[in-house]
Structures are given as C-alpha cells and as structure tokens.
Amino acid sequence: MTDRAGTPAEPDPPAPGDGETGEPGAEDAAAGAPEESAAGGPGKPRRHWLRWTALGVSVVVLGAAGAGWWFYRKLDGNITTDTTAADELRRYEKERPPANSSAARNVLLIGSDTRSGEGNERYGRDRGTQRSDTVILLHLAAGKRSATAVSLPRDLMVTVPSCREPDGSRTREQFAQFNLAFEVGGTACTIRTVEKLTGARVDHHMVIDFQGFKKMVDAVNGVEVCLKEPVDDADAHLKLPAGRQTLHGEQALGFVRARKSLGNGSDTERMDRQQQFLGALVNKVQSNGVLLNPSKLYPVLDAATKSITTDAGLDSLRDLYDLARSMRAIPTERVQFLTVPRRPYTYNANRDELVQPAASQLFRQLREDEPVVVKPGEKDEDHESGGTEAPASPAPTPTFTGRSAAEGVCS
C-alpha cells in the first residue's frame, strides 16, 4: 500500500508474538497456536489433515496398482506359448505366402478334440492323438472394417504337406481329409495345409480344447440359442427342450459338438450351429459391456488365458486384449460367418471337396483384404451333406451364403 500517490508507506513494526524470526513469541506461536479450519474457525491443524489424507490416498493408489499388477501377471502367466509350431514354420518360410502388406490379419482358430488333460477324459478314451474338431480362419480387415470367419470342414479333401510328427519322423505329402493334418503334425501342419489351400498367410493361431470352451461360455454367464425341437444326445451329453434358452458350459459344448441327434446328422449342420453359437457369443460380449466392466472382464480373461495355446505374437495379455478390442470396434452386422464353398466329394459322399470357382474367389478376397458379402441362403437338398454353394457371379463382389453376428438366435 501507499499513503499517498508515489510514496511508499512505512511498514508497521511487528507486534510482539507475531512470529518474526528472532522475535520473542515466534516459536510459541508456531508450536502452540491453533490454526483456523477451512471454515475460518478453530479446528484440527490443516497440515496434519493434509498429511493423513495424502498418506491415505497414496496407500489406496499403491494398493490398486499392486493388485492390478498382480492380476496382470497372473493372467499373463496363464497363457501357453506354442514355440514348436514357430520352429517348424521357420523351416518352410520360403514356401509360405508373403506376409500381409496391410494391417489386415488372419488368425487360425483350432478346436482340438483331444481327450488328454483334466476333465477331457469324459468325452472318450485318450488314444494319444488329437484331431481338429473345428477350424476357423478369422480374417480381420484393415481399419477394423469387418471380421470374416470361414469354417473349414474337417472332412474336406485337401493336400496335406509333409509334416514333422511328434516322434521326429516326417510324413509324406498326401491327399487326405483336412483334420488329418492336426493329428499327424499338430498346429504347424494345419497352418501349412490352410496356407496351401487358400494362398493366404496365417499370422496368428489359437488352440482351445473342450474344457477351455466351456470355461469361456461360463465366464460370460451363458449364451442364448434357439432350438426348433428337443434334443436328446447321449454321445454329446446333451438333453434340451425346444425353444429359446441360455446354454452354459457343458450344454454349450454338447450343442456345438452334437451331430447325430440334430438335423440330418451331417457335419454341415454342425458347422452351421457352431457359427450360430459363435455369433451369439460375439453379440453377448459386445452387448453387455464385458470389455468395459473390469468385474465382468476379469473372469473372461482368466478363462481365456487358461484355455488357449497361442503363437508368440498373441501370448501376452496386452496382445489378446488388443485383439478383443479390435473385435469390439466392429459392428455386429460386419462380423460374418460362412463355410468355404464345398460339396460332397466325387469319390466318397462322406467327404467334401471345394466348389470352384466360388472357393477361389473367396480365398482371393481374403488375400487381398476385399469385402466379403454374406447373406442367408437355402440349403441345397440335392446334397447329402447339407452343404450350400456360393455360385459364381459376374458381379464385382460375389455373395456367399452365411450369417452375421447381428442376426437373432431364432432367425
């Protein structure tokens, strides 16, 4: 302040006890005088209150960070990495299709029918071998435009290359049904067979067994399906009434595995049910906020990480979450399911063969990351296997028979 314009006022001398350094009463004031509360009246010392608040916040933050790190390490440690497949694939790198130049990715999903491992013995005797009960090539388009899941029939006749067996010996190249590749040479042999068939490079893979599938379904609290008629299948451990209902672990596994008691007993109808179920599962995960709710997300991640074997490119929690997040960004109507165009094999009606040129058109679109259009179609009653064909089309974008995750379970 000034006492008049341009002339500074002399400062008032400090009063005794004001606390100036060296003045009498300063230490007394600092040690004994109560401070005012935030409201202006007497209360607990603000300094002490701030210290305790800061300490409490620090404990909570550190505790949360510690718990988060513990959960992360636990989930990350659940994942099994398949190094054997990577070693084998490196031996044949020169003959494999080139890596994708765009951000598109191809992930091979393999459902193993192995009877080894805890809980799997109830589905049959462990004979020391396993086959690929279900194989799906999942194409994730660049820019998260779409996801296309192509089922490859286990009975499809294909060229299986020479592969390394578990005992170190090698098989000869042979023309055989598709699921033989997984039996004789495991994941690497299956990947090489798919790449020879489609000309598309497999960037990543996941293998899941019976128990893993059940845990995933239970983690999302079941998946809704619709049955036109009741089911009683002892082989699949499945007994269900007709109508709309929610299936949990054991029932869900029976539903996607059942063959003899549903429809015409063909593998074709079983693949249709698998696609229907996976579409409903995708819809469930995207619609109930699983990926945005930690309390719902943790059980799903725990079940997933315990249940799968992956390549090194997907063997961390971060990699798996990024994959799930990219799926979440895709609208359900652009998450599509179809079976590769095929028909009964000419020399054995119990096997399948590709329908050309439809199959080649589909494989080309996947390789070049072009949109794949699917629509519901009628079954070809002339085909004993119940298959459907995607006829050749003069249009720039051919249409294939399939379904999307947005379709209702009773559609």
Image: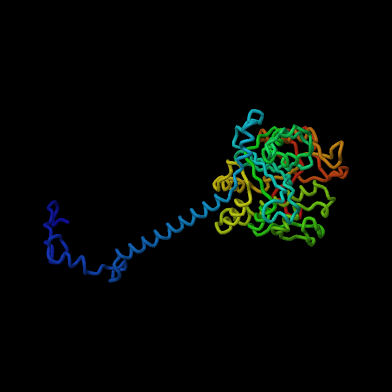
Question: Which image quadrant: the N terminus?
Answer: bottom left
Task: List x then y, in percent, for residue 144.
Answer: 61, 42
Q: Nearer the viewer, residue 223 or 176?
A: 176
Q: Nearer the viewer, residue 76 or 344?
A: 76
Task: List x then y, in percent, for residue 346.
Answer: 86, 36
For the question of whether residue 177 can be seen, the reply is: yes
Asked if residue 380 lies left or right of residue 160, the reply is: right
Asked if residue 174 lies left or right of residue 305, the reply is: right
Quarter location, residue 205: top right
Q: Nearer the viewer, residue 142 or 60?
A: 60
Task: List x then y, in percent, for residue 328.
Answer: 61, 48
Task: List x then y, in percent, for residue 50.
Answer: 33, 62
**How are the colours assigned in the image?**
rainbow
Residue in view at x 70 percent, y 54 percent:
120
Q: Residue furthest bottom?
A: 42
Residue in view at x 42 percent, y 57 percent:
62
Number of marks in picture: 0
| Whether residue 146 is situated above or below residue 288 in the rendered picture | above
For the question of whether residue 371 can be seen, the reply is: no
Q: Residue furthest top?
A: 94
| Whether residue 284 is situated above or below residue 349 in the rendered picture | below
| Whether residue 239 is situated above or below residue 7 in the rendered picture | below
Quarter location, residue 153: top right
Quarter location, residue 174: top right
Asked if residue 27 lies left or right of residue 70, the reply is: left
Asked if residue 46 lies left or right of residue 376, the reply is: left
Q: Nearer the viewer, residue 1 or 213?
A: 213
